[in-house]
Amino acid sequence: MSINHSNHNRILKSLISGRNISEKQLKKIYHYLCLQTHPDLTGKDGKEFIEIQKEYQQACMYFNKLKDFVKEGEIDPSRLKNPRHELLLNLYHYTIAGLHSVKIRMKPELKSRNAKIIKSILFWAKWYDKNFITIFIDYNKPQFKCFKQWQSEKEHKVIRKQFLYSLYHFFQYQKTGSQSKYEAAKINLCDTLDMIQINSKNSLITLERMVNWFLKEIEFSPLYF
């Protein structure tokens, strides 16, 4: 496996890029990067080596979350007491699994895992906010049915990246309750909305509805999952 050393999040990107990476492969990548960055071997200050260790710990967390999710199989109705928590947790799985990417969503070897995540999102949306079912389904349609058109429009790429960046801060706020993450998420969601409204294209209406939904959700208390 070739690794770009200039990529600061190399381990995480290898994990969620759709290669269906195993735990053994993840450790192999980690050990290789340690050899490439260890201060005793490179003569450098060790800053990159420390960062690699942090990335590996986070990658293991993501790996175990997705692995446990796939093992669970069927949805547990006993968790109905907090459907908002379950919906946002599964949307978090959706994000870290890279399902916003058409290439990852359509990979045959990941079909079972992806289907379970989507099924869970739709299930919990039914119990928490039925309107989100339509929003979520419509949001994904242009990514899969009109992929070439979606990719060809540069503005869509920029806006979509801005939205994904907003989701990163949104879920960090849900995990930590940090005021700075709340502010970062809200600012970036609002910036995404502004970019959509400036473009004012019908193809961005579904994305606009997604952004508005997350803007509503961020005003509720964080879940600390």
Image: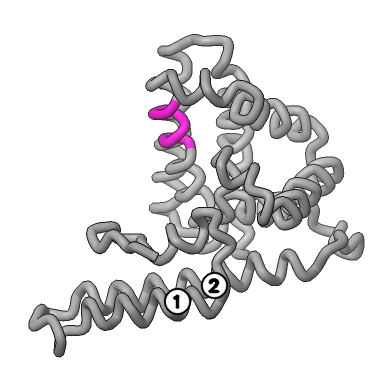
Please indicate whether residue 116 sits to the left or right of residue 2 in the image: right
Q: Mark 1–mark 2 contact, CB under 8 Å?
A: yes
Is 220 part of what is drawn in magenta?
Answer: no
Q: How many marks on residues?
A: 2
Q: Disc 1 designates what residue?
A: 57
Q: Position of residue 89 (x, y in %)?
A: 67, 56
At x 76% / y 49%, what residue is drawn? 115
Q: Is residue 32 left or right of residue 102?
A: left
Of all residues shown, which one is farthest toward the left? 43
Q: Residue at x 56, y 35 (%)?
A: 215
Q: For the point 80% across and 48% down, which residue is it?
A: 119
Q: Residue 106: where, in percent of width, then height?
A: 64, 42
The reply to whether residue 121 is in sight is: yes
Q: Position of residue 113 (x, y in %)?
A: 71, 57
Q: Is residue 147 left or right of residue 151?
A: right
| Position of the N terminus by quadrant | bottom left
Most distant residue in the right direction: 77
Q: Secondary structure at mark 2?
A: helix
Provide the major secondary structure of the magenta segment.
Answer: helix
As displayed, is residue 106 above or below residue 38?
A: above
The residue range painted magenta reads: 157-163
Q: Amino acid at mark 2?
A: Met
Disc 2: which residue: 61
Left or right, 79 with reference to 225: right
